[in-house]
Amino acid sequence: MADVLPYKPRTGEIPTDPGVYRFRDADGRVLYVGKAKNLRQRLSNYFAPLRTLHERTRRMVTTAASVEWTVVPTDVDSLQLEYMWIKEFDPPFNVRYRDDKSYPFMAVTLGDEAPRVIVTRNRKIPGARYFGPYPKVWAVHETIDLMIKAFPIRTCSDASYKRAMQTGRPCFPGQIGKCGGPCSMTVTIEEHRAMVDDFVAFMAGGDERFTRELRKRMLAASAAMDYEAAAKFRDKLSAIEAVLGKSALVLAADEDADLFGIAEDELAAAVQHFVIRGGRVRGVRALTIEKEIDISSADLVDQVLQRAYGDAQDVPRRILVPTLPDDAAELEQWLRERRGKKVEIAVAQRGQRADLMRTATINAQQALIRHKTRRTSDYVARTQALTDLQEALGISEAPLRIECFDISHLGGTNVVASMVVFEDGLPRKDQYRSFNIAETTDDTDSMYQVLTRRLAYLDKPDETEVIDPTTDEIVGEDVGEATVKRRPRFAYPPQLLLVDGGQPQVEAAARALRDSGHTEIAVCGIAKRLEEIWLPGDDFPVILPRTSEALYLLQRLRDEAHRFAITHQRKRRKNDITTVLAEVPGLGSSRIKLLLKHFGSVTALRAAAPGEIEEVQGIGPVLAQNIHTHLATR
């Protein structure tokens, strides 16, 4: 492969102005759209020596046949043009949104003579005011049912409303008391419009002035012994409080904001968008993003905000994000033009905002895990993953049993390893194993030791077990047909060994296979930084497509092995800590728990004076001095 792209423009040809650029393939299809404050500086990154580029960026620039750019007056203009071109061309190498479902909204048709409240997925109703999105349709209907008890506005269809106004007979919701529109003959169009304004004001901010006003009217009616009116005010008050109780106050009562929690890995990202109005979460929207080329967290936030507000009608005063985009000032100006007022983009760093950001991020992490594991529930997807893996690695059969190994340590101490097993693309947690490594020089040596120990089980002879068919228990004597031969589960040979790491770890694994005499087992490694697949003896990695089922399977294996190794290591460290304290005479398990709860760690306990240790319940002066002396000598 040539190190210089044939279509690379001369440096002097590229302007230093802000603008938007497009990479096209030989057929003229737009592959990627990007913006830059300085076109020359940005494009020079793509035309650096190919060996220095991220693997997926390299694939994009080598697929392209030309690049073109458009200079614009300001950075805000480049932001607008980039959004328009991404929407128009849908470039395959830009981030791909997997938000394949439309969310239900509550809409108030303010453009109608007698506005009504409806549930809809259509965001283009002229003059409508939208609230949401809601995760489920039933959640919208439940909110509307509660709201119309306090603000009885129209809910019937336009046809029913027109027929009722012509005939003078109320619509069916009006007859049963669930619609207070003009067709019910109880209010005028002007009075109904006032109720609609109150409905919108309440939903927009959860204004608790309605609660105070209704409570004041209820008490006044009760004092005047107008108990029928007081009961109506009471019912409306209960309805409003029920709506407020559905969404807890998460920020200040006057806070209108959108908050974006993001979780990402090298190939995908999940976004949780919390819509906060009047300090309460009024809607939640989730989407998943697939990344084709290398993109920073700041650029990802930039793309998410463009997507969220490109055609939005409701832009809040404040937008909270986990990472500030590089062009935050330009984005604020772009959003200000849409809102008509100032918009602030900020990072949630402390207090209630930080707490809510953590909640959104946890939801995003769980959504990302669901996105990555959803395919494993599909038999066709699992079969495709194993077939793709067989072809990509060039092995003779599909790897129905895959074992993945990961090494974990803490600064070179407490070195442990994990082995997770997937059969037919599904985890077999009953066959997971953990390894302790007493002495090692580095990760490759650890990998060699662990695989050598694991492969030794393949050479053990079959074991005969006698099973009682009535109880499925092992018995001590032959019971005729109950005798069966079973190999220990640990002795089943895998078709593929996967190691967490790059070329050095793979070579160590291959050496263990050769030394054990099991070269019939295939081996590969997955390097996390670029998600490259390494084979022994190869100078270059195998790059699986971003949407490959095989890549998702290997990722899940690697992540599961890492999780299992970390869990085992933490358990070992906890046991080590308990062992150190258990060596102190007179210190039992109950007092050890109290000490660790009080000080938080052995490090803090070691730094404490005997007098401070005495403050713990059940620790006297002599025992405190013994603890202090023992830890000081360890």
Image: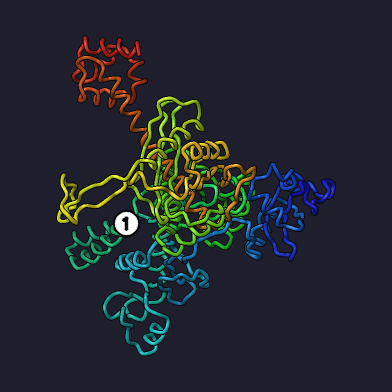
Q: Residues within 10 Å of mark 1 (few under 14, many from 20)?
A: few
**Is residue 125 depicted above or below 214 in this figure?**
below
Q: Nearer the viewer, residue 588 or 491?
A: 491
**Quarter of image, res 627:** top left
Q: Secondary structure at mark 1?
A: helix
**Quarter of image, res 340:** bottom right
Q: How many marks?
A: 1
Q: Disc 1 residue type?
A: Lys
Q: Nearer the viewer, residue 379 or 290?
A: 379
Examine the rendering and report whether any part of residue 277 can be seen: no
Q: Nearer the viewer, residue 366 or 274?
A: 366
Where residue 93 sits: x, y (%)?
63, 57
Where residue 391 sits: x, y (%)?
55, 57
Q: Residue furthest bottom?
A: 167
Colour basis? rainbow
Q: Residue at x 49, y 58 (%)?
A: 385
* Left or right of residue 272: residue 324: right
Q: Residue at x 21, y 25 (%)?
A: 589
Q: Residue at x 47, y 48 (%)?
A: 496
> Disc 1 marks which residue?
246
Q: Nearer the viewer, residue 312 or 43?
A: 43
* Left or right of residue 449: residue 395: right
Specify the quadrant that holds the C terminus: top left
Where residue 157 sits: x, y (%)?
40, 80
Examine the rendering and report whether any part of residue 140 can be seen: yes
Where residue 592 sits: x, y (%)?
24, 23
